[in-house]
Image: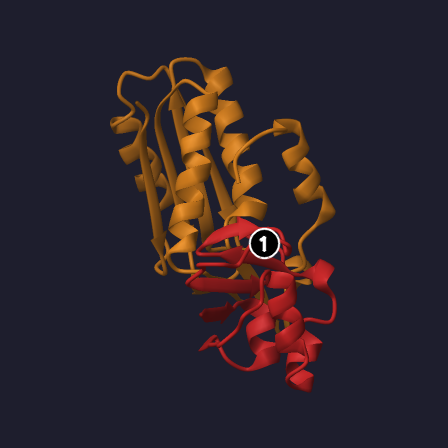
Chain colours: A orange, B red
Amino acid sequence: MTDRVIRLQEAPFDYGAECAAFAGRAGGAGAVVTFLGLVRNDGGSLTRMEIDHYPGMTEAAIDAIAAEAATRFRLNRMLVLHRTGPMHPGEPIMMVATASRHRAEAFAAAEFLMDYLKSRAPFWKKEHRAEGSSWVAARDADEEALDRWAGGAG
Amino acid sequence: MRVLYFAWVRERIGRPWEDVETTAATPAALADELAAREERYAAAFADRRALRVAIDQRLVDFDAPLKGAREVAFFPPMTGG
């Protein structure tokens, strides 16, 4: 039974503190892998980013993805933390953490979670720039990234 | 049936959700009905390939059965992470 924690929040989070808390409860794991996504500022003109989501489905979709990860990899613990609402360049958007007996499964599970979160969890990014606002378009590469986990969740 | 819209679909249609009386058998048929209403709906549903649909908060195909659904959502491909 993999312990899994899913959190959605508007407020920024402290990545260091989250990592330390996660590792502290890793349940005898020998390896912890963490990933942090930041608000990127391509071109330097981004003033604000906003993440829209589908309350209810978001939690259910992430939980299904995490449950699938738990069947594919031997994990002691998983964390998925994703922000919604307005945020600024350089701030954290989201993080995942995985704990396993050995590193290979912790790395693979973190990649699996990220690949599915990108295109199977109902989040939508909107970028606000001095010259106007636009919704971020999905990338083919994100969809293709799921192929390597063929037969997976979502 | 409650119909929800997210991201640019919501902005194009101008509302986050609405209750719709429909006998549409699939999300595709529902999208056709909505698109026939007004220009802003037609614009939102013009390119079906640019849309995804969920029935009762589960991603489905546009030809999935709609019977018994409480909630249908239309939105663009997701861009989380």
User: Which residue is painted at 55% across and 40% down in the image?
Assistant: A116
Q: From the top left corner, tell me how far across and down residue A34 is, in percent.
A: 44, 33
Which is nearer the eye, B22 or A19? B22
Q: Answer with left or right where residue B47 lies relative to residue A40.
A: right
Which is nearer the eye, A13 or A112? A112
User: Which residue is painted at 57% across and 58% down in the image?
Assistant: B53
Under mark 1, the amino acid is Thr
Q: Is residue A99 above or below residue B42?
A: above
Q: Answer with left or right where residue B67 lies relative to residue B79.
A: left
Q: Answer with left or right where residue A112 lies relative to residue B41.
A: left
Q: Is residue A143 above or below residue A45?
A: above
The residue that mark 1 highlights is B79
Q: Is residue A123 visible?
A: no
Q: Residue furthest bottom?
A: B38
Q: From the top left corner, tell me how far across and down residue B19 is, in percent.
A: 44, 76
- The chain to which mark 1 is attached is B
Say which quadrant the N terminus of chain B sits in. bottom left
